[in-house]
Amino acid sequence: MRNNRVYLIHIRDCISRLEEYTVDGKAAFLADIKTQDAVIRNLQTMCESTQRLPLEWKAICLDMDWQGISDFRNVLTHQYLEIDLEVVWDVVETYLPPLKIAIEEISQEFWNV
């Protein structure tokens, strides 16, 4: 069985990369297919890792839409021909910061578990 902390590491790494890849703003993101690919891939990995976090860990952040994150991962993975880059940008801009805070709260609570 994999240590659950590895998922926290994956999520943190993905968030860091997503912040780096999108630092130049929406116009730069929409203009560069490599950045789009990198962002989408890291969102997939990040969302997959959140699915693997123990329910007990996610329970301390009840305001986080864990099911919505899981559903978004499924869209990115299985409905890739229908990905709307405006939606992807909105996720990065609107939903990534609160997720980062939630992951830090979970890390502080459960890192030594």
Image (tube, grey):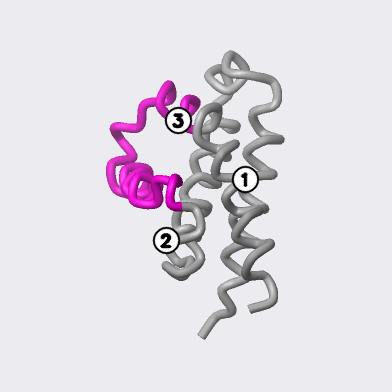
* Residue type for callout 3: Val
Q: Nearer the viewer, residue 11 or 104?
A: 104
**Cα separation between marks 3 and 1:** 19 Å
Label 3 crowding class (10 Å Cα cut-off): few <14, some 14-19, many 20+?
Answer: some
Q: Nearer the viewer, residue 29 or 92?
A: 92
Report x, y in % for residue 46. Answer: 52, 52
Q: Is residue 31 above or below residue 63?
A: above
Tag 1 residue: 101
Taking the spot 38% from the left edge, 48% from the top edge, the residue there is 73
Label 1 crowding class (10 Å Cα cut-off): few <14, some 14-19, many 20+?
Answer: few
Tag 3 residue: 88
Report x, y in % for residue 23. Answer: 70, 26
Report x, y in % for residue 31. Answer: 56, 17
Q: Earlier in the sequence, mark 3 or mark 2?
A: 2
Q: Is residue 32 above or below residue 83?
A: above
Extent of the magenta region: 62-91
* Residue type for callout 2: Gln
* Residue type for callout 1: Ile
Taking the spot 43% from the left edge, 25% from the top edge, the residue there is 85
Taking the spot 57% from the left edge, 18% from the top edge, the residue there is 26
**Cα separation between marks 3 and 2:** 19 Å
Say what secondary structure mark 3 lies in: helix
Q: Which mark is residue 26?
A: none
Say what secondary structure mark 1 lies in: helix
The C terminus lies in quadrant: bottom right
Identify the main secondary structure in magenta: helix
